[in-house]
Structure formats: structure tokens, C-alpha cells
Image (tube, rainbow, N blue to C red):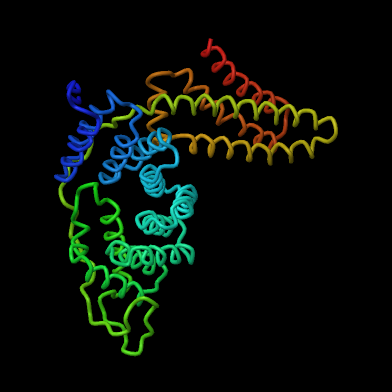
Amino acid sequence: MPAPMESDTTPEEHRQRALLLADLGRYDEATEEIAAGLSAAPDESALLATLARIHLAAEQPVEALAAADRAAGAEPGTLPALVVRAMALTDSRRFGEAAGIAGEILRTWPEDAYAQRTGAALLSESRNGQEALNAAWNGVRVAPAEAEAHLVLAVVAARLRLFDLAQRAYAEALDLDSAIGDAGLDVGVVRLERRRWARALEELAEEASLGAAPPPDASAPEGYPVEQTAKPVPPKWSEPPAVSRPRKPVLDVSAASGDAVLETIRYGANGTLVAAVITASMTLVSAGISRVWAGLIGVLVFVAVVLWFRSRLSEPVGRVLSRLRSGDRWLAAALYLTFAAPLFLVAYAAVGGLPTLLACMALAAIAEAVVLIGRR
């Protein structure tokens, strides 16, 4: 449990303490410091963004995304919140949303060195291509003396299998800052991006020898000299440094998950009822057409309900269902009925029969009734 916040300790001081603890790999204590700061300033974007970065460093993308969403909601459109949210979305494998945020970063801050190189790297993580490469080159143009700009170009190029360019960019990064070679060993969160890109490059180095000197007649990309000597490859770490990961989330996302459950039941049950009524009315025209329609709409409704439910959650589905079964069995039953009801439309399409259609309506109606009664 986090210690009570002292009267003379500001949220920013708690954040600075958390950063120092994170530099030592003590992520659990760092999150406790953040929790202490949030007890007095629950909507402080800097605290929330730092919490998200700590969870990212601890490889806890679910908790990171919850904190990043809160940070982005507290201060919409700010660069730190957008960056950490894009990283959390990528680690949660929601690549489309991450690519959208990366594009927003690149468009909003075209002359900001950090924004350009970070946006390029984030875009290459979620949707690599020429746009990411152009952005990486722009990052080098904006800040040619910053090693991280060349490191990002190396990562983006390697992901595109442009290994010659990746070698040259990484060599330039090392020339500007030799500490780049050890960036993957950092356990803090201040340079989380640098470590992320360095580790990505180390993984990509297994696909090609980035340390080999290019052929003498190799054409150099604009901005790099033709003559190159062999440079060290990114180091290969046998195992990550020891850290103490947070044992429990700081933010309670159960309320948001509860809202997602209620919305899923409401929309899913209503949609199934409407589909069943239309199916029943179509039997007056043709039983065959009615069954074909029921099969198609039943599959569509079931898939839509499942995808909607998963997209609305910021924590694993299994955790939500387990909490429902232990805390609100009626609501859990209503959710399962919502998933089951459209399958009876599919069953009607397969075997026909009015009882199957009535069972579909009954399940959807019961699920809706549980929600309505529970809200009173």
C-alpha cells in the first residue's frame, strides 16, 4: 500500500522519486510513489504518463494502456501522452490505433526533433513502409547531431530490410553517442524510447549482419559518407536486467470494464431481438429465405458482439469474466446469454423450427431484463 502523501510533498516530487526508483529497476516501489501522488492529484497527466511508462518498462501493456488512456484524457493532444499511448497500443497489438496516433504526432510537430523520430519509430512498429522511412529521414534532417535520430533511422531501415542504410545509420549513432551501444541495458523510464529502439535493432540484427562493412562500391544514402569501416553491431543481451515488477495495478479499471459489460449486453441483446423478429416475419414470405437470413445475421451479430466487447476492455477478457462470476453472477449470466442468443439464429438456420427462434428471443430478452432490473 502506498504511504499517505505528506503535506509538503508535491505530485511532481512523487514523480521524480518514482523516476529514481525506476532507474534502479524497482518498478513496484515506483508505482507506489505514483499512487501516492495520484491520491492528491488523480488527473495529473504527468503522473499518469509516467505510470504508463513504468508499466511499459515492466512489460505490462494492459496496465500501461489504462494509465495512458487516463493521461491522454487529462490533457488531450499533448506529446508525452500521445507517445506513451501509442507504445501501449502497440504492445497491446492494437496496431491500427497506434499507427493513427503516430501519424498525428508526425503531422502536429513537423519540426520537433523528438516528435519526428519518435513518431517515425512508432509508425514503423505498427505499419512500416515508405511513410515511416520518410519520417525517420526527416528526424535526422531536423536534428542531425542527435544520436537517437540516427538510431531510429537504423531501426526503420532494418524493418524494411534496407540493411545497408541501417548499418550506416547505426554507425553514425555510435559516432555521436557511444552509449547507444549499451542503451538496451537501461532499466529506467526516462530514456524508455532509446532502450525500446535499441532492443528492436538488436532483434533485427539477427536477420542480417548489420556490423559488416558495406561493399566498397555500395552507394551511400544521401547524408552519409560513402567510405565506411566496420562498426560494432548492437549488443546481444543474454537476459534483461533484474527488476521488480508492480504486483498490482495502481488504477482501478473495473468500473470501465463494468460499463463495457452493460453496453455489450444492451446492444447485443437488442440487436439479437431485432434480428429474430425480422427472421420470424420473413417466414410469412418463405421459410427457406428466412433460414438463410437467420444464418447470415446470426453469425454477424455474434461476431459483432464479441469484437465490440473485446474492443471496449482495457484489461484481459478472462480477468473481467472471473470478476463477474465472483462478484455479480446475474450480470455474468446475462453476458453469457447475450453471446449465446445469436447462436440460436444459426441453429434455426440449420434445423429450422419455431422453438429455436423463440429460444433465441427468450435468451436475449432475459439478458436485457437482468440489466434493466439491475439499474433500478
Q: In the rendered picture of this protein, how many numbered marks are placed on residues? A: 0
Above or below 217: residue 323: above
Which residue is farthest right? 285
Q: Position of residue 76 (x, y in %)?
A: 44, 38
Q: Is residue 367 left or right of residue 350?
A: left
Residue 300 x %, y %: 63, 40
| Residue located at (84% from left, 30% from top) | 284
Which quadrant of the figure has residue 263? top right
State whether residue 118 is above or below residue 283: below
| Quarter holding residue 92 | top left
Q: Is residue 25 left or right of residue 123?
A: left
Query: Residue 308, image x and y in percent?
Result: 54, 36
> Which residue occupies the foreground of this view, 244 or 307?
244
Q: Residue at x 54, y 29 (%)?
A: 264
Residue appearing at x 39%, y 73% in the figure:
162
Q: Split into 4 quadrants, where in the image is the N terminus? A: top left
- Tell me where residue 81 sits by quadrant: top left
The answer to which of 112 and 66 lies nearer the viewer is 112
Looking at the picture, tell me which residue is in the foreground, 347 or 208: 208
Residue at the (48%, 63%) spot, across then down: 131
Front position in the image: 272 or 144 = 144
- Classify 231 as above or below 76: below
Report whether 8 appears left or right of 335.
left
The residue sitting at the bottom extreme is: 217
* Residue 302 coordinates in the image, percent (x, y): 59, 36
| Residue farthest toward the top in the current orientation of the protein | 376
Q: Is residue 21 above or below residue 106?
A: above
